[in-house]
Amino acid sequence: MDFPTSNGVYMEPGGVIRTVGNPVPDGNIVMDHAFEIAELPVKLELRYVIESKRAANGLDCPKIDHNSKDSKNQQLTPEEEQRRKLRRERNKVAASKCRMKRKEHVNTLRQAAEELESANSQLEAEIAYLTAERDQLEMMLDAHVCNMEKAVGRGPA
């Protein structure tokens, strides 16, 4: 049963969107693009684009049975159910362990970054101190008058 919508678009069971086709003399169907694709939700838009391309290439659209997952669960034996349950439990434990390891790794990296930033700040402060000390010593050197030549007696006295 088709579920009609506006502008020549109809939806089949399972959510497949189709447009009203206009037959042409050679037997091909031309898709009627009388609606805006962007108005559709993303999944429906993608489905429509894929189906349009497949129809343009003369390919049929695959039918997907959404109820097949339920039938698989009903066919499992008790042993398979137990194995599945144990596997899920192990997966939960492994996922939890992985999340904790990742969190610890992030914390370790954050702590290392803070230590490096602290060391960098200390080094910058030491550079500033040493630069100021150098400038002060250069000023003292420039202000110093050398009287050594007079004391030795070599100069013009």
Image (cartoon, rainbow, N blue to C red):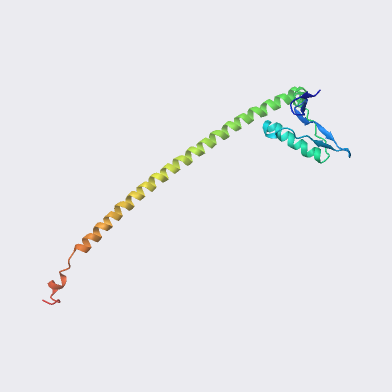
The quarter of the rendered structure image containing the C terminus is: bottom left
Q: How far from the left and from the top, in percent, is residue 105?
A: 51, 39
Q: Is residue 124 in view?
A: yes
Q: How far from the left and from the top, in percent, is residue 7?
A: 75, 29
Determine the residue positioned at 30% across, 55% down: 131
In the image shown, does 97 or 71 lie closer to the viewer?
71
Q: How far from the left and from the top, in percent, is residue 28?
A: 86, 38
Q: Is residue 75 in view?
A: no
Q: Residue furthest right?
A: 26
Q: Quadrant of residue 51?
A: top right
Q: Quadrant of residue 60?
A: top right
Determine the residue positioned at 23% across, 60% down: 139
Determine the residue positioned at 35% across, 47% down: 122
Determine the residue positioned at 71% across, 31% down: 44
Q: How far from the left and from the top, in percent, is residue 101?
A: 54, 36
The quarter of the rendered structure image containing the N terminus is: top right
In the image shown, does 8 or 127 lie closer to the viewer?
8
* Vertical order, 130 against 110 (above or below): below
* Vertical order, 6 against 119 (above or below): above
* Vertical order, 31 against 72 (above or below): below
